[in-house]
Amino acid sequence: MSSPYIIWTLRRTGGTTLAGLLATLSEHPGVEHEPFNAERVFGEVVRGWKADPDPERLKAHMAEVLAPRPVIKHCHELLPHALNRALARVSTRMGYVHVVLDRQAEVDRILSLELARQTGAWGRVEAWRVFEALQSGERQIGPIDIPEALQHLRFCMARRRVLRGLFDKLGIVPFEVLFEEVYGAPEIGREKVRALLDFIGIDPGGFPDYEAQLTEALLRKGQNSARLMDFVPNIAAARRKLLAAAETGRPQEALP
C-alpha cells in the first residue's frame, strides 16, 4: 500500500497538474486542491482555530479531517504558520509523507500570479480567453503593482525558510521536486515523476494508461499565462525589479 501524501507548494508552481496525476494513481481518497482555504472543504479547521486558537483543539480537528487519509495539495503561503505546523505534525504522525514542489523561475511565478489576480485567468481555458480578448483589442491589462509583487516575493522567500525549518525540527525529509524538472525535458520529467512515485510507494505498472496520463501531464505546462506578458505595459520594469529582489534575498518581515 502506498502512503498518503501532502504536496507543499506555492501558487503558480504547476502543482495542480502534478497533483491531479498522482491522485489518479493513489488508492487514498482525493480532495479538492488547497482544501484548507477558507471557502473549501477543510476551511472549517481554519475558522475554528481563528475562533479559538487552542493548539490542542487545532490538532484534534486536524486529525479528524485527515482520518480518511486524503491526498492533499497545499499552498503553504496561504495559511498562518500555526496551521502549517499543526498540519505537518498531525499528518506525519498519521503516516503521511511529504512532497515539496517549487519553481526555480521565481520571478515568472510571481508575474504569473499577478496576472491571474488581475485577469481572473487561473486556468488554461480562462488564460486562452483573456489572450484572445487582448489580441482583438476587446480588453486591456493594467500595469503590474510592483510594490505588491515585491512584497509577495519576499513573503514567499520567508515562507520557504520557515517550512524548511519546520521540517528540520520535526525530522521530516520531504521529496523535493522543481517545476522545471517535471515540465522541462520530457525524459527528465519522466524520471523525476517515477522517483516521486517510488517515494510515495505507488507502482505505476498497475495502471495500463499510466504512460498516456504521464505524457498528457508533462505536456500541460501550468496555465500558459506567459502569452499574456506582452500585453502588460510595465512588464520590463516589473521583471527587472523582481529579479533584483530575488537575487538580493533581503531579510524578511515577521510572519503572521
Image (cartoon, grey):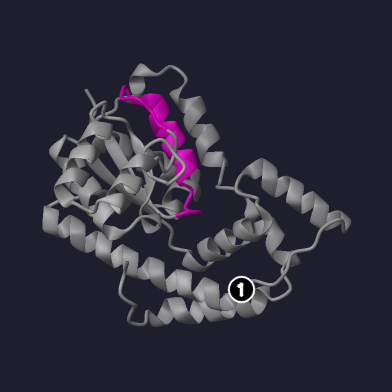
Q: Quadrant of residue 66?
A: top left
Report the residue at 11% width, 52% height from top.
171
Location of mark 1 (residue):
145
Position of the N terminus by quadrant: top left
Report the residue at 28% width, 59% height from top.
81
Q: Quadrant of residue 10?
A: bottom left
Q: Quadrant of residue 138?
A: bottom right
Q: Is residue 35 magenta?
A: no
Report the residue at 65% width, 50% height from top.
121
| 107 up-or-down from 77: above or below | below
Q: Is residue 29 magenta?
A: yes
Q: Is residue 44 left or right of residue 224?
A: left
Position of the C terminus by quadrant: bottom left
Question: Closer to the camera, 183 or 236?
Answer: 236
| 232 up-or-down from 100: above or below | below
Where residue 91 sits in the image (x, y, percent)?
Answer: 21, 40
* Magenta part of the chain: 11-31
